[in-house]
Amino acid sequence: MAAGPLAEGRLVKCLVTSNPTSPTPTASLNTLNADLHCHSVVSDGTLTPEALAQRAAANGVQLWALTDHDEIGGQARAQQAALAHGMQYLTGVEISVTFAGKTVHIVGLGFDAQDPRMQAGLRATRGGRGERAKEMSEGLAKVGIKGAYEGALKYVGNPELISRTHFARYLVEAGVCQDTSEVFRKYLTENKPGFVPHRWASLKDAVTWITECQGVAVIAHPGRYGFSPNEEFALFSEFKAHGGQATEVVTGSHSPAEYVKYADTALEFGLAASRGSDFHSPEESRIDLGQLPPLPSTLTPVWALLADRIQ
Ligand SMILES: [Zn+2]
Ligand SMILES: [Zn+2]
């Protein structure tokens, strides 16, 4: 898709506004180059919000959202940079919740970032990351990897947001593993020495914060959790019952077969669909901003529900 000067940016809003919640989505609305999932240095990405905006625009993104983990401190910068590059912008966040004993991610789009309910909820969710990181470091020390907490801290702009990804980067730097996926596999997943379970927000809390603040809640990369069919049914049913309205279908975390599977799931549950690269870093991410295939034409894109929230 061609790069997006201002005229194309206006086209996005125009298309969305002229077709707000049509039950039969038009092809043009579905083929917008929307990338509604990525991370900056405000959480565990390696680029600034400004550098991400530049990269997204260069890749032809027309509608963009920055969705840092449990943090909205980059929203104003991202929005400003998006508009400067002629892209339309939706506010974004990716909230960690615990569901069926696993960590599940819920993306929020188009919410009011100034709303104190969202800010208080995210603050509560962030609490506990520091303690968990120290326990992870103790676990790694027991298998001979010393100083991982201090090492991981070098990779995080905000110590409240220290995460497994930062540990992974340090273990690669320290020569313990070849790449970050090897670190996760050998050290940071269930039953491995650096794994410490953490209780995040509840599914209901996350969906409620987003919808109370006028946003739309989206299940992030549902194919990544390894749920059984029953657990997955429960996730989608409960999400919908709490007011969730969309699921990611085309994401950097899904295989093409999973695009098809979750397109069917979206239709089965009457959910809109989202598209996002989950881009973290030029070195680590398989899919670049704006480079995914379009949403299947049978689905209602999540941006059709957010026409009045697009900036
Ligand atoms: Zn995620
Ligand atoms: Zn993500």
Image: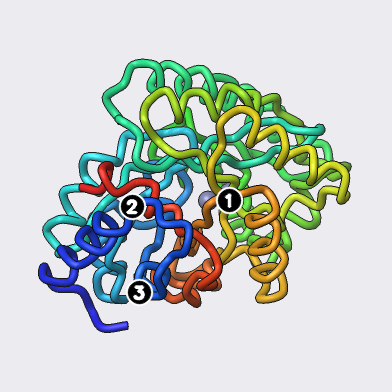
Q: Is mark 3 within 8 Å of ligand 2?
A: no
Residue 278, above or below 260: above
Residue farthest along the bottom direction in this orientation: 2
Q: Measured along the vertical axis of the image, is residue 245 above or below residue 223?
A: above
Q: Is residue 204 left or right of residue 272?
A: right
- Circle 3 packing at 10 Å, graded few (<14), some (14-19), many (20+), is few
Residue for point 64% across, 31% down: 97
Q: Secondary structure at mark 1?
A: strand
Q: Which mark is residue 68?
A: none
On-image quarter of the N terminus: bottom left
- Mark sitting earlier along the chain (1/3): 3
Alpha carbon of mark 1 to alpha carbon of mark 3: how far?
20 Å
Identity of the residue furthest to the front in this view: 23
Q: Is mark 1 within 8 Å of ligand 1?
A: no
Q: Earlier in the sequence, mark 3 or mark 2?
A: 2
Please report the residue visible at 29 percent of the width from the left and 75 percent of the height from the top.
60
Is residue 228 shown above or below 93?
Answer: below
Tell me which corner region of the image, top left, top right, bottom left or bottom right, holds residue 72: top left
Q: Is residue 135 above or below residue 93?
A: above
**What amino acid type should be assigned to the residue bearing mark 2?**
Pro
Q: Is residue 112 left or right of residue 145?
A: left
Q: Residue at x 53, y 63 (%)?
A: 299
Q: Which mark is residue 247?
A: 1
Disc 1 crowd, CA 10 A, few/some/many (<14, 14-19, 20+): many
* Figure quadrant of residue 77: top left
Residue 236 in picture, x, y percent from top left: 70, 42
> Left or right: where does residue 57 sit relative to residue 254?
left
Dot label at residue 28: 3
The percent coordinates of residue 47 (x first, y second) are 35, 57
Q: Position of residue 109 (x, y in %)?
A: 40, 42
